Image: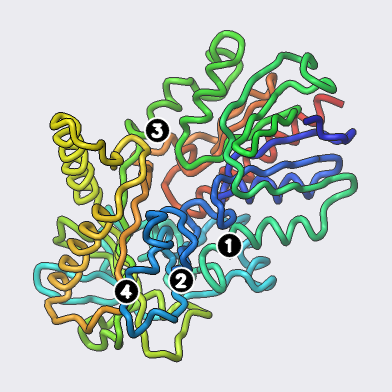
Amino acid sequence: MVIESCAYRVAILGAGVAGSTCAASLLRMPGIAAVVYDMGGRGPGGRTCSRPVDGQGGSFSPADRGGRSSLSEAHADKDLTFDHGAQAFTVSHPEVRALTEAWERAGFVGRWEGTFGKLDASTGAFVAGVAAADSDDTVFGLLGGSGASAADRFVGVPSMGALARGILSDAAASPAAGSTLTSLFGAKATGVTYSGEGEGPAGARWTVKSSDGVSRHFDAVVTAGHAASFAAQAAASLPGGGGSGGSVSVDALRGVSYPAGCSPLYSLLVAFESPLGDAAPFDGAGVASSDDLRWISRDSSKPSRQRSDGLDLWVALSTEGFARRVEEQAAAETAEAQAGAEAAAPRAQGGSRPTEAQLQCVAAQLLEALRGALHAPLPPVAYVHAQRWQAGITRAPLGLEPPCASWEEYGLFACGDWAAKEAKVEEAALSGLAAAQAVGRAHDASQ
């Protein structure tokens, strides 16, 4: 498929914060035809997406009807939505602060006000305030640090999933002259091929194949995944294997890709029939002295999440160690089943979806870890489930300056928090902005 346009044709592969911010920045430049791909059937967001319990499948087992079968019978008619990835974000960079204030004015971002601090899982004691944060672990910046104000915790409204969608919609409403945005949600990019300078259809250099069965042609490609594996594959296809003319080596990209450079993560999604009350005197807490939990959030306390039915929604994020133990156990169970010539169970490692039984087991373990960390009994549970993030955390981001990878000669660019200094929402946004600037230079050079 040739995109009929005299504009500079750019494919953005991934619509998390980095990809969405990149696309929005490109739309402010004249003469850009941007096409955004995102494999999420529910829309954009990446790790800032949200999980509605609506029976539509998704990352829950299809047989579980989107996790809805986990609702207790008394609450089977309730609509629940959890921020099951990034819980919030802070800002310290002037450019991202200006963007965030604009998003707040547009109504798809709000300030999460409440009580935050550290929970000592060994005693159940909670200490409020930024001062409670360990110097080497501010939990994605949510307890302050790096110049971020403790009062500036932002979330998408009415859910974190609204962040990326709002960024794209807001930009598409007022593009620069001759610029357009096409969003292909639910279309996973399955292959990227470099054709050479002007050798593809209509003079395109790149062809992108996607899960919708269509091949589209572009002048430039931006890979915007939080893991750099797709960027590494595209760069390796360039003349000379991407070893020359790029701002980073292919080996470095592979080093921050799954599984070598990324840690898995599990989220606990739980709705209690009544508030936790004094057992959890906080809205968000980093967890110390726990082998299983890293962060706990009261989802119900975020703006536009208040409920009138009495349910209290919480999300807990696992430690890397907990996730790796789960992965190792699941892999061993799968190997045992295969060795016994039984029906092969879906693997929980290497990209395959975990089974419903595995997710429920993880949820039970994390719920018990939550009870143990609070040192208090929990109210009856209306809903509980777990979410697996295969490449949840980039362990050692590259810290590039500017925070993106580029092969401007060939029209290839890559962004994500893996390219920046820290694995944070703000850093992903900065990376997307940097990639857009690099694309802009390549566009100018092509004219």
Where is residue 208 shown, x and y percent of the image?
Answer: 66, 29
Q: Nearer the viewer, mark 1 or mark 2?
A: 2
Return the disc, 4 or 1, that comes first in the chain's sequence.
1
- Image position, residue 328 (x, y; %): 18, 40
Task: Please tell me in which quadrant of the rendered image residue 128 appears.
Answer: bottom left
- Mark before the other along the chain sequence, 1 or 2: 2
**Is the Cβ of the residue at disc 3 closer than 8 Å to that at disc 1?**
no
Q: Residues within 10 Å of mark 3 (few under 14, many from 20)?
A: many
Q: Quadrant of the C terminus?
A: top right
Q: Residue furthest left?
A: 122
Examine the image and state in which quarter residue 275 appears. Answer: bottom left
Q: In the image, is 204 to the left or to the right of 326?
A: right
Q: Crowding at label 1, few (<14), some or many (≥20) Cα neighbours within 10 Å? A: many
Spot occupied by residue 436 in the image (x, y as percentages of width and height): 68, 40
From the top left corner, tell me how far across and down residue 335 is, in percent.
Answer: 18, 33
Mark 2 lies on residue:
81
